[in-house]
Image (cartoon, rainbow, N blue to C red):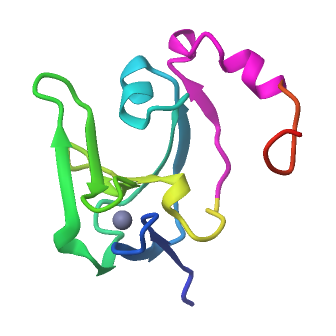
Amino acid sequence: MSNLISGSCLCGEVTFSLTNDFSRFYLCHCTQCQKMTGSAHVAHLFTAPDNLSWTSGETSLKRFEHPSRSFTKVFCTECGSGLPFVNKSGKALIVPAGSLNAEPNIQPSHNIFWHERASWYDKGITAKHCAGFPE
Ligand SMILES: [Zn+2]
Ligand SMILES: [Zn+2]
């Protein structure tokens, strides 16, 4: 039985597919993840390191490794979107949830490095909801 899920970057240059079989889903609020995303947190799904097929654009990938710490980002050189990568230890494939084109098989279980969260995060999640830009 096939249970494939696809994903891509924003510009569509890079596409991939994998089995929708994730074991962990964390939102990381650490200050490094805030820098990497330019936003409040990363949303990372974990699966087996060999659970990935690039279907296009593999030559447009760039990998950044922090020189002294275990922070990695793989991104499209055209649009900068975060994309899946095997972590430094080689034990897990980490997939940014927003790169997927459909629902993952699991929901987030933990907000990690919660004490480092952005000072504006708590207010942000209770701010007014609008369908588009505010009037
Ligand atoms: Zn792209
Ligand atoms: Zn982090």
Residue farthest along the left direction in this orientation: 67
Q: How many marks?
A: 0
Q: In this picture, which residue range is highlighted in magenta?
A: 106-126
Query: x and y percent of residue 114 in the render?
Result: 57, 16
Q: Quadrant of the N terminus?
A: bottom right
Front position in the image: 4 or 9: 9
Q: Which residue occupies 19% across, 24% down?
A: 69
Front position in the image: 49 or 122: 122
Q: Is residue 97 left or right of residue 60?
A: right
Q: Is 113 rendered above or below residue 109?
A: above
Q: Which residue occupies 16% across, 72% down?
A: 59
Q: Is residue 57 left or right of residue 133?
A: left
Q: Which residue occupies 66% across, 65% down?
A: 103
Q: Quadrant of the C terminus?
A: top right
Residue farthest along the bottom direction in this orientation: 1
Query: x and y percent of residue 63 in the render?
Result: 18, 50
Q: Which residue occupies 53% across, 65% down?
A: 100
Q: Name the image quarter holding residue 56.
A: bottom left
Task: Tell me if residue 39 is in the magenta stretch.
Answer: no
Query: x and y percent of residue 12 in the render?
Result: 42, 74
Query: x and y percent of residue 132 in the render?
Result: 81, 50
